[in-house]
Image: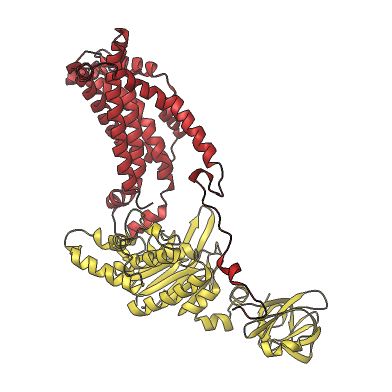
Amino acid sequence: MLDDDHPMTAETISAPPRAPRRPLFRRRSAIPGFGLTLGVTLTILSLIVLIPLSAVAIKAFSQSPAQFLAAAFSERAVAAYRLTFGAAFVAAVINGVFGVLTTWALVRYQFPGKAVVNALVDLPFALPTAVAGIALATLYAPNGWVGQYLTPLGIKAAYNPVGVTIALIFIGLPFVVRTLEPVMRDLSEDVEEAAASLGAGRFATIARIILPALGPAWLTGFALAFARGVGEYGSVIFIAGNMPYKSEIAPLLIIIQLEQFEYANAAGIALVMLGVSFLMLLVINAIQAWSRRFV
Amino acid sequence: MTISIRSVEKKFGRYPALNSVNLEIADGELVALLGPSGSGKTTLLRTIAGLEFPDAGQVLFEGQDVTFASAAARRVGFVFQQYALFKHMTVARNIAFGLDVRKGKDKPPKAEIARRVDELLKLVELEGLGKRYPSQLSGGQRQRVALSRALAVQPSVLLLDEPFGALDATVRKSLRKELRRVHDATGVTTIFVTHDQEEALELADRVAILNAGRIEQIGTPHEVHDNPATPFVCGFVGEANRFEGTVSGGRFTSGPVILPAPDAAGGAALAFVRPHDLVLDAEGFAAKVERVVIQGPLANVDASLPDGRRIEICAARDEAAKFSSDIRLSARRAHVFAA
């Protein structure tokens, strides 16, 4: 309460100095540098990502719309898209399943040689993809170490879409494992004990508690593996067989167009891949945002 | 549900966590396991829960041996120190989980589960928060969710591991009363672990004091405070001034300090005097007052003996003025143990 001995004029109460409204970039903040960091980010993003990609779009539209459609949606190109996105999707799903198991083994158990296994998981990150492609092709070819046992079973695992998928599984695995690992490590034992004390069996605990908790990270890993698979070139071309309409991936088709000096055609195919990839990643991100609602 | 713990032993590596522990808990009782960290109180609780299994000894529920039965088979409700809520589920689904995972005819119909969830939310005063996620709740609210999740399965016994450990003082106090209210409302046998003696003494019907894997004393809060069985209990429960000295002829002597020890055997001894049992007495031993702190109705006095040892005295606030610099004290009561 104010009393008369300490008079306070109306002005001092009603007119505190107001901070002038500043534009977004100039607001005061405890973490300064918003303008600077955003500026640098946009510059780099433009130079490295945005400008090259828009060049693709510009090049693609340098021809007439009819020419663009004919090049980008020719029968051969559509078959290539189907193979590229289909194989990348299947490979990402397979990695999604085995990635969870691999991560589980690495996080939950101690076993001799764990450090080696751990390093092996990262190898696809580091290995030149062509090396991986040649090695896989040699192994899975009908007369290769693994292929020779598959052939009698009627399975052809190289020089066809199956071969493409195998290469993409190899490339994508570490993305799933490394994304899941920290999240799985953070799952506390308490939560599993709580589920058990409430009467949940081991299976129910895994299905209802552990896997849902891993959901958002799993989706991230899946998206990364999928995106990597769509763009993969080096390892695939050695094992794919590269038969037009059958086992020719879209990135290879782009190279072929370039070698024939059909730059606009190449840009058209690239643009379609770009559009589809962007759309799919956007959808996956949206699902992810939704699945993170509880975090 | 009566619970009997018989000669339970448990080692972690070479470190004995429980050392031949015996404990009988009556139906509907609210018991506190009190002890410093590393005393084995949490291990004992987890052994009762079926989350830990003893190396030797027996755990009986209602006379039935459940030593190696799983937590689910024992129908215990366990509240974890860090709550262990399912983050990806709403509050309502967290509470419903124990009913929801049941199979076949044991699983109650949906409407029944929803009714039970509402009932529990009401019991812990969280009505209307059923659709929130745990991350949207405060610490105290999460604790209540954990409590009602454990109660949802109508457990035969409710076990709580440091239930208020992670909460601030005000919330702690109100939740303490809340737990007592919930216990009285449900009548479920309840055991909780704490290192906070105030919490144990205020809340529990009986307190078991653990030290180094052993139960030092079991009794009502009143008993363990006023008639401590061992020096450890005396030092751990309530405030006490500790003296080392000797007993002869019904008197304990430690330097200038002389304390009444009518029942103690002669020889070396340890004596504990509660601060409120030290009173001003012109015939008593001398001490020098260093500081007087008024706390509500009490005056807490820090003083030192001529030989430098420090003692604490607790008096009524009205008496604060009498604690000028030099005082003489005597003890109304002392707990004396043979050393």
Residue A145 seen: no
Horizontal side of residue A26 vs A184, given as left or right: right
Q: Color of chain B here? A: yellow
Picture quarter containing residue A235?
top left
Task: Give the answer, above or below, for where B108 lies relative to A166.
Answer: below
User: In the rendered view, would you say A187 is above or below B220?
Assistant: above
Please tell me which residue lies in front, B33 or A236.
Answer: A236
Horizontal relation, residue B254 to residue B116: left or right: right
Whole-percent x, y for residue B36 in the image: 56, 66
Type of colouring? by chain
Figure quadrant of residue A167? top left
In the picture, residue B212 is in which quadrant? bottom right
> Which is nearer the eye, A212 or B14?
A212
Residue closer to the observer: A136 or A274: A274
On the image, the x and y values in percent for residue A236 come to 31, 18
Where does the image place residue A123, in percent across and percent down from the top left?
Answer: 42, 25
Q: Residue furthest top?
A: A260
As drawn, the chain in red is: A
Q: How many marks?
A: 0
* Up/down of B83 relative to B261, above or below: above
The residue depicted at 32 percent of the width and 18 percent of the height is: A59
Q: What residue appears at the point 41 percent right and 75 percent down from the top-left corner?
A: B178
| Residue found 29% across the figure and 37% down from its top | A97
Q: Quadrant of the N terminus of chain A?
A: bottom right
Point 32% across, 73% down: residue: B122
Q: Is residue B240 visible?
A: yes
- Where residue A105 appears, x then y in whole percent? 38, 39
